[in-house]
Image (spheres, rainbow, N blue to C red):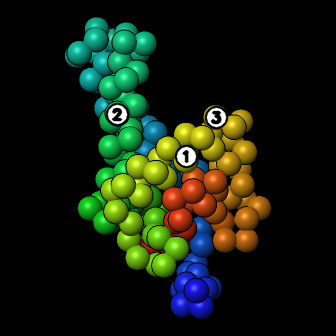
Amino acid sequence: MAATADVATSMAYVGFWRRAGAFVIDAILLGIVGNALSAVMFGGDPTSSIGLTTLIDLAYFAIMWSSTGGGQTVGMRALGIKVVGTDGAQIDVVKGIIRYIGFIISCIAIFIGVIWVAFDPRKQGWHDKIAGTYVVKA
């Protein structure tokens, strides 16, 4: 337990605004891809394509947050931040999926779980706490 505390105190946690900026970049990218696929596969009907776009979002975030994607989405790379486990190591895809599900829960709860980042001493949102992750400077 002491080793985890030592690792945690040596990390440079990233706050709300930088994380929000990275998410906006990712949302724009995923919006472009989702709209293009929706136009091709569903004639542009967003209601018909919601399942596909949700699956694409899940795969994108889970893979990019994991060691497979280097712990960084495109937006996170642009802003110099990354996701790591509470032990400082990169996470696997399963933990990425858990973090994504936690993110959805954080958003559904009128974004309280996301806003939590601004007030938490280690800058963890609910999704970070659920998955056991931190967002740190890359």
Q: Amino acid at mark 1?
A: Phe
- Label 3: how many residues lie within 10 Å, few (<14), some (14-19) or many (20+)? few
First in residue order: circle 3 vs circle 1: 1
Q: Position of residue 112 (x, y in %)?
A: 72, 45
Q: Is residue 17 visible?
A: no
| Whether label 3 touches label 1, CB < 8 Å | no
Q: Position of residue 125 (x, y in %)?
A: 64, 56
Closer-to-camera residue (1/124): 1
User: Which mark, by number, is residue 103?
Assistant: 1
Q: Is residue 53 visible?
A: yes
Q: Is residue 93 left or right of residue 13?
A: left
- Label 2: how many residues lie within 10 Å, few (<14), some (14-19) or many (20+)? few
First in residue order: circle 1 vs circle 2: 2
Q: Amino acid at mark 2?
A: Leu
Q: Position of residue 103 (x, y in %)?
A: 55, 46
SS for dot 1: helix
User: Which mark, by number, is residue 55?
Assistant: 2
Residue at x-position 49% and y-position 52%: 99
Label 1 and label 2: CA atoms lie apart by 14 Å
